[in-house]
Image (tube, rainbow, N blue to C red):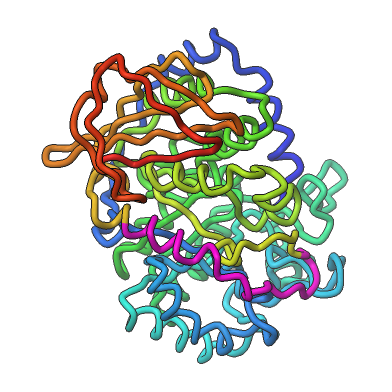
């Protein structure tokens, strides 16, 4: 969800990051995992489905035929953006925000019926895929039934009036000091697992909701079936102890954008891993992405933000530790900012990027070093003199891969470090190499090589 307050806080955090801050981060207690992530996620690729914009009809039924195509693309997890009825009071735009939920147990009639959604889930399961849905626990629409039925479930200002968070005028802030709200929200979360057999949730602004609630919710859901939980959060570390399996690699995403603009270098990537590797153990999944619904609609398309580096940063998102995300239309080279509150269908006519993303899926799934979490290989950053080239090695007990990424629009000549000596084949070109330490090789602008 587009959260101005959240963004401002993030900007302040990153603006204030200094060497002393990094040193302070390095002393933090590492997240201690007490839950196990479902086995089926260990090599998974996640796809964010914007039902409204996916097809001319914008319905579950119209989307269903695309499931087999997405399976062929290498997708394992379908994250469906909010499926619930959208509030009409204080609505933004004609169709409203997906994140202004009017009824947690209802289905947006524009998308279809409950049976239509259940059929979608069944089709995904038949294709060996899993479905998680977007969940908005921090606030509701102003015309949600709870407003009148359970007013004490909502936060009040000093005058006793309900209010909206940040600049989200179409929603009303919930009050998690009220334990009855916990029960009501968990009941709604259980409903979709029991009724529609979904496999988990992507939880909107998860860090704005108390961890205590999420811990209780996770226990309740796992009693029904083991679920996969994705938090839209990066800095509420205790969410990753017992409640969630994966969070957002927001900082990494911002670094990608900054490098593409020439505002940062590979040095910032080194700092990133120095910082976050001390906080999150390998068992915590990080979601890597070059776009999503917020980034596309509010901050620009991948081409606006990453320019000619789109494919290079996509390769990076598939090969660094974490699970890669594909957003609706990304595989079609979507070049427009999709309207958030209106109908704005994706143009699927461009198939240029489909083989590219299929090859990335093949790369990830056939090589365990690139799997997610603790199932993937350890990462060793290779030090180079050129701060525009990111080089790293992924290693596990049986496999080793070296990744070279020229994160600039200039041709680069690099001297190979000791850690790269050996015989290799490039995954993308099948070209074979005998590399020696101290040898120079050239990389074209935005070149990428994955060597085995």
Q: Quadrant of the C terminus?
A: top left
Q: Quadrant of residue 127?
A: bottom left
Q: Quadrant of residue 12?
A: top right
Q: Is residue 135 visible?
A: no
Residue positioned most to the left? 398
- In the image, 227: left or right of 109? left
Q: Residue at x 81, y 61 (%)?
A: 170
Q: Quadrant of the N terminus?
A: bottom right
- In the image, 39: left or right of 99? left
Return the residue nearer the eye: 84 or 163.
Answer: 84
Q: Look at the magenta stretch and give its main secondary structure.
A: loop
Look at the picture and state if 229 lies above or below 50. above
Q: Quadrant of residue 17?
A: top right
Look at the picture and state if 151 lies above or below 249. below
At which x and y percent is residue 359?
Answer: 38, 59
Magenta range: 339-362
The mark tally for this picture is 0
Return the residue nearer the eye: 104 or 406.
Answer: 406
At which x and y percent is residue 333?
Answer: 61, 62
Look at the picture and state if 426 lies above or below 143. above
Residue positioned most to the top? 20
At which x and y percent is residue 125?
Answer: 34, 79
At which x and y percent is residue 364?
Answer: 32, 53
Q: Residue at x 69, y 40 (%)?
A: 6
Return the residue nearer the eye: 240 or 156.
Answer: 240
Q: Is residue 351 magenta?
A: yes
Q: Residue at x 68, y 32 (%)?
A: 261
Q: Is residue 6 magenta?
A: no
Return the residue nearer the eye: 229 or 441.
Answer: 441
- In the image, 45: left or right of 300? left
Q: Residue at x 24, y 56 (%)?
A: 366
Q: Is residue 446 visible?
A: yes
């Amino acid at each position: 969800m587009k959260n101005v307050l959240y963004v401002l806080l993030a900007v302040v955090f990153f603006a204030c990051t200094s060497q002393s801050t990094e040193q302070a981060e390095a002393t933090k207690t590492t997240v201690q995992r007490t839950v196990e992530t479902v086995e089926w996620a260990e090599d998974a690729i996640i796809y964010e489905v914007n039902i409204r914009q996916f097809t001319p009809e914008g319905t579950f039924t119209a989307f269903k035929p695309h499931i087999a195509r997405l399976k062929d693309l290498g997708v394992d997890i379908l994250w469906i953006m909010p499926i619930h009825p959208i509030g009409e009071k204080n609505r933004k735009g004609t169709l409203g925000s997906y994140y202004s939920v009017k009824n947690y147990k209802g289905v947006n009639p524009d998308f279809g019926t409950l049976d239509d959604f259940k059929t979608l889930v069944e089709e995904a399961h038949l294709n060996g895929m899993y479905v998680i849905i977007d969940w908005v626990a921090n606030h509701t629409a102003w015309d949600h039934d709870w407003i009148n039925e359970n007013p004490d479930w909502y936060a009040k200002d000093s005058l006793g009036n309900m209010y909206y968070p940040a600049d989200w005028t179409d929603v009303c802030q919930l009050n998690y000091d009220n334990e009855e709200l916990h029960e009501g929200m968990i009941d709604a979360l259980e409903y979709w697992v029991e009724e529609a057999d979904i496999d988990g949730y992507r939880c909107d602004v998860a860090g704005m909701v108390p961890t205590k609630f999420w811990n209780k919710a996770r226990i309740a859901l796992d009693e029904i079936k083991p679920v996969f939980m994705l938090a839209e959060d990066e800095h509420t570390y205790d969410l990753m102890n017992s409640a969630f399996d994966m969070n957002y690699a927001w900082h990494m995403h911002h670094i990608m954008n900054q490098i593409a603009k020439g505002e940062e270098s590979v040095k910032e990537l080194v700092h990133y891993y120095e910082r976050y590797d001390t906080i999150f153990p390998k068992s915590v999944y990080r979601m890597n992405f070059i776009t999503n619904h917020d980034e596309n609609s509010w901050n620009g398309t991948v081409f606006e933000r990453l320019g000619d580096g789109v494919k290079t940063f996509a390769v990076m998102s598939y090969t660094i530790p974490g699970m890669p995300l594909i957003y609706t239309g990304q595989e079609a080279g979507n070049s427009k900012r999709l309207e958030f509150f209106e109908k704005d269908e994706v143009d699927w006519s461009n198939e240029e990027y489909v083989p590219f993303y299929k090859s990335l899926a093949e790369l990830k799934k056939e090589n365990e070093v690139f799997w997610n979490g603790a199932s993937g290989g350890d990462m060793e950053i290779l030090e180079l003199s050129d701060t525009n080239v990111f080089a790293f090695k992924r290693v596990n007990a049986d496999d080793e891969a070296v990744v070279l990424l020229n994160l600039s629009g200039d041709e680069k000549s690099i001297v190979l470090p000791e850690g790269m000596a050996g015989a290799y084949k490039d995954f993308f070109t099948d070209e074979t190499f005998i590399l020696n330490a101290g040898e120079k090789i050239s990389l074209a602008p935005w070149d990428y090589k994955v060597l085995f």
